[in-house]
Amino acid sequence: MAVSKKTALAFKSYQNQAQVLVKTYLLADAFMPYTSVLGGIFASKMVYDLTQLISTFYFRTYAGLTKIQRIEWNNRGMSSVHAIFITAISLYFVFWSDLYSDQYTNGPVTFRSSPLSTFALGVSVGYFLSDLGMIFWLYPALGGLEYVVHHTLSAIAVSYSMFTGEGQLYTFMVLISELTTPEINLRWYLDTAGLKKSNAYLINGVVIFFAWMVARILLFVYMSYHVYLHYNQVIQMHQIGLLLVFMVPSVLAAMNLMWFGKIVKGMMKTLAKRQ
């Protein structure tokens, strides 16, 4: 009994010390960006490994893939999980949270942030850095120049917003566009598994069309309108923040329109074959 009580007290003491360490350092506002970025990198690696493990046991197609195809398979699993996470967080902050609401009078909307918003952006930075590293490592197998430009601009813009707290609302608006990533990855999975002529492939293509139009076309129009309505608050941002708010969405919007054209052509071609 005495030993058990002594052990319990020692365990409780270590637990309290760990809680103090976490609150004082890992989750402190000053360390939150670095902690969340490292957490994002660790989570990306963990999801990559889990995708590999699960696919080995439950997907017969996986065993027949080449080495580079298996790497891309795992990479797409990683990007899908990140997309689901950041889309859910972004939708919450943009449409449901009071943090960026016009009724919330605690300063300009362009300077509002919270520990949760900063943490979420840090996790996203960790993912973009991980994925960008893999793209460079296997270039151009996992994506060409357009992917490098997309990920580099995203990492820079999200990092700036995370560290400074500026323009986080518009960063989350842009990150909602990750909504289309799981569908794009599913299209690749179905194609790789030899199911390009299946109904699932056709339905997924239609879903991609509408999701892309809403998340990567119309949402950018809404963002531009929001910037116009809050222009007097936007111009209070630092010059770097202003450049990122106007330049990054413009470049990404142009790329989205280019990719949307390819999606429309692909869907029309598939429907024509079906008919």
Image (cartoon, rainbow, N blue to C red):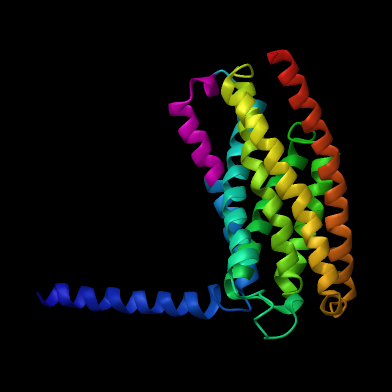
Residue 187: name its quadrant: top right
Q: Residue at x 49, y 40 (%)?
A: 50
Is residue 144 visible to us here?
A: no
Residue at the image position 15 percent from the left and 72 percent from the top: 4
Residue sitting farthest toward the front: 275
In the figure, is residue 183 to the left or right of 241? Answer: left
Coordinates of residue 7 in the picture (x, y in percent): 22, 73
Q: Nearer the viewer, residue 104 or 144?
A: 104
Q: Position of residue 118 (x, y in %)?
A: 64, 70
Q: Position of residue 183 (x, y in %)?
A: 63, 37
Q: Is residue 17 above or below residue 190?
A: below
The stretch of residues the image draws in magenta is: 47-63
Residue 162 at least partly seen: yes
Q: Position of residue 258 (x, y in %)?
A: 86, 39
Please report the residue visible at 72 percent of the width from the left and 42 percent of the height from the top. Answer: 212
Image quadrant containing the N terminus: bottom left
